[in-house]
């Protein structure tokens, strides 16, 4: 399973689950390095989502992506979707950028203990739980309420 497969599956399920009052957009464009993969807009505001596959404690990300995610979260709302396949179970960790990226630009695994996590036997079920989380975040209606 690739990042593109996981993002495509999430987009399909999220658009169906969230309906026409939400706008989900994939922003992957090789000419605009650093822009997060997905944005969701609903209930009057936009959230940014960067998807990464995690193997062990490592993930591949560029410095500009990490910097952009940190800046977007400071100015608004941004989260990493960290996908992990353990064989029997598929997981997504929904993590704050500051729990993924150290100040020196290196990655850490603080997100394993601070993130919201969903797991299931199929990616479709994980994506449905992620869509429910996206809906919950928007339904709360304010950035402050979304992470307290």
Image (cartoon, rainbow, N blue to C red):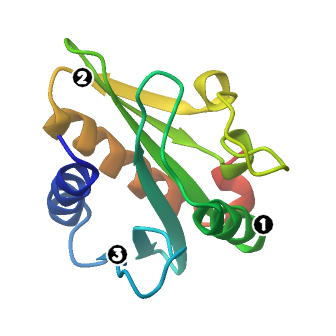
Relative to 134, is 116 on the left or the right?
right
Outermost residue on the top side: it is 88
Percent coordinates x, y for residue 24 in the rendering: 31, 73
Percent coordinates x, y for residue 13 in the rendering: 17, 55
Q: Residue at x 59, y 33 (%)?
A: 115
Q: Residue at x 55, y 78 (%)?
A: 45
Which quarter of the rendering shows the C terminus? top right
Identify the residue under disc 3: 28
Percent coordinates x, y for residue 68 in the rendering: 65, 70
Which quarter of the rendering shows the N terminus? top left
Q: Residue at x 53, y 68 (%)?
A: 47
User: Element under label 3?
Assistant: loop
How far apart are the alpha carbons under marks 3 and 2?
27 Å
Percent coordinates x, y for residue 51 in the rendering: 41, 53
Relative to 137, is 23 on the left or the right?
left
Q: Quadrant of residue 75?
A: bottom right
Q: Residue at x 52, y 32 (%)?
A: 58
User: Element under label 2?
Assistant: strand
How packed is label 2: few (under 14 Cα within 10 Å), some, or many (20 or more)? some
Identify the residue under disc 1: 74
For marks 1 and 2, the one nearer the N-term is 1
Q: Nearer the viewer, residue 145 or 53?
A: 53
Please say if the residues under marks 1 and 2 sit with CB atoms less than 8 Å apart. Answer: no
Relative to 34, is 100 on the left or the right?
right
Could you say which disc has been placed on residue 120 in the image? Answer: 2
How packed is label 3: few (under 14 Cα within 10 Å), some, or many (20 or more)? some
Please say if the residues under marks 1 and 3 sit with CB atoms less than 8 Å apart. Answer: no
């Amino acid at each position: 399973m690739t990042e593109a497969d996981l993002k495509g599956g999430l987009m399909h399920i999220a658009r169906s689950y969230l309906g026409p009052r939400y706008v989900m957009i994939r922003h992957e464009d090789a000419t605009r390095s650093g822009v997060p993969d997905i944005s969701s807009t609903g209930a009057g505001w936009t959230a940014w989502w960067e998807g990464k596959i995690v193997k062990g404690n490592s993930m591949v990300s560029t410095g500009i992506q990490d910097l952009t995610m940190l800046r977007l979260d400071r100015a608004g709302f941004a989260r990493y979707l960290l996908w992990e396949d353990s064989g029997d179970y598929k997981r997504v960790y929904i993590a704050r950028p500051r729990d993924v990226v150290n100040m020196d630009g290196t990655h850490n695994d603080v997100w394993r203990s601070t993130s919201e996590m969903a797991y299931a036997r199929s990616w479709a079920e994980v994506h449905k739980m992620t869509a429910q989380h996206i809906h919950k975040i928007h339904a709360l209606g304010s950035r402050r309420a979304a992470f307290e």
